[in-house]
Amino acid sequence: MKIVVLAGGTSTERSVSITSGTMVCKALREKNHQAVLVDVFCGIDVKGNLEDVFAEEAYDIDKAAEYMHSFDAGLNEMIESRRRFFGPNVLELCEAADVVFLALHGANGEDGKVQATFDLLCIPYTGTGYLSSALAMDKSITKQFFRAHHVPTPNGVTLKKGQESEPLSGFGLELPVVVKPCCGGSSVGVSVANDAAEYTKALETAFSFEDEVVVEQFMKDAFSYEPEVVVEEYIEGREFSVGVVDGKAYPIIEIAPIEGFYDYTNKYKAGATVDTCPAVLTEEQTKEMQKHAEDGAAALGIENYCRLDFMMRKDGRMYCLEANTLPGMTPTSLLPQEAQVLGISYPELCELLIQLSLRKRGNNA
């Protein structure tokens, strides 16, 4: 098949996305697909016919990744000077492909906007649709849907800018708490606050992240967008993640950071965590967490595949934190590790995700 692996973009997870896209593209080439790596925002320089891009036998994926990174330093200037999100030749190349593998993470990629555009243009793509993508990207809405569908989730509140001085007790919370941007991924901007000073700093960090997202989403009118953050009870215990593929939970993986919590650095730095898959849990605990993962994905209407994050207290009570609709596909990412336990290699996983997505959308591969 002719496949565009779409990565990069303008989010704070741009670098991670390029790493995911590079690995996916290499895996698909290994499976004899005509896969090409493309930056959704910066585009691709095409000389001649678009079909020639797919047909290039000596296609250099690492060179394509280097080309994408060459825009990193000037990305902010590009954002300020452009009104159009999609880069040169991106939509045309995606329309010429059999399917687009979305290796995007964060704003303008994982939030449903790209998916909605592709739906209007009848471009097949991997992952879930635009609505469930948007719901899962908003942590406040995600918690509402979890509660409505009886998926256990930590107590919490959504704060708008200007509510920083309101006491936690008024929301039924007490320190320590977790403060996170309402819309973001890879734990960027997330903090654990143990005292009043840390709480103030955590709010500043989270709201600053939301201000950056405004620019990334090309929402220039400050009056049309009010930043929000989620403040929730801190769950002390073990951390887990569960992939859900085609409605069924994969083996549970436990993540134990060597230092701190599972933040951006620990997610993507090799050796920063001890990952155990399958996680050491009782059979009853395993079934319960997997059921919560499947229910959480269903509550948000997520199709094809996703990954849900959990915390479990010492007494066995477990809580679903959030859902990731385009989980990472880097060397340290969790979904590929879970698939490996089932005997599914990385290239086979990439192939599977494409086949599931095409089947759901009524396309034949």
Image: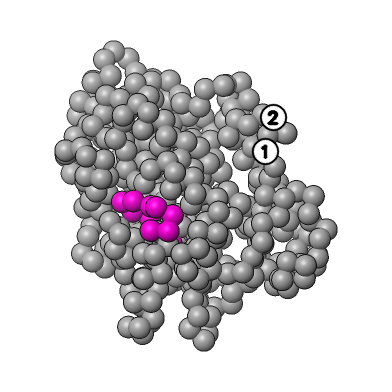
Q: Secondary structure at mark 2?
A: loop
Percent across and percent down for residue 239 are: 49, 72
Q: Which residue is mark 1?
A: 225
**Which residue type carries mark 1?**
Tyr
Q: Circle 2: is it few (<14), some (14-19), or many (20+) Cα within 10 Å? A: few
Residue 174 horizontal/vertical position (percent): 73, 73
Q: Is residue 338 left or right of residue 108?
A: left
Badge 1 density bin: few <14, some 14–19, many ≥20, Cα 10 Å: few
Task: Please tell me which residue lies in front, 8 or 364.
Answer: 364
Horizontal side of 299 relative to 100 (left or right) equals right
Amino acid bearing label 2: Asp
Q: Are marks 1 and 2 in contact (CB under 8 Å)?
A: yes
Q: Residue at x 67, y 38 (%)?
A: 225
Range covered by the magenta-colored residues: 298-310
Q: Kindly report the distance in space between the C-alpha atoms of the residues bearing marks 1 and 2.
A: 7 Å
Image position of 4 (left or right of 41): left
x 72%, y 71%: residue: 172
Q: Is residue 275 visible?
A: no
Q: Pick the quarter of the image with the C terminus.
A: top left
Magenta stretch encompasses residue 156:
no
Q: Please state the horizontal and vertical placement of residue 243, each as a whole percent of the image.
A: 36, 61
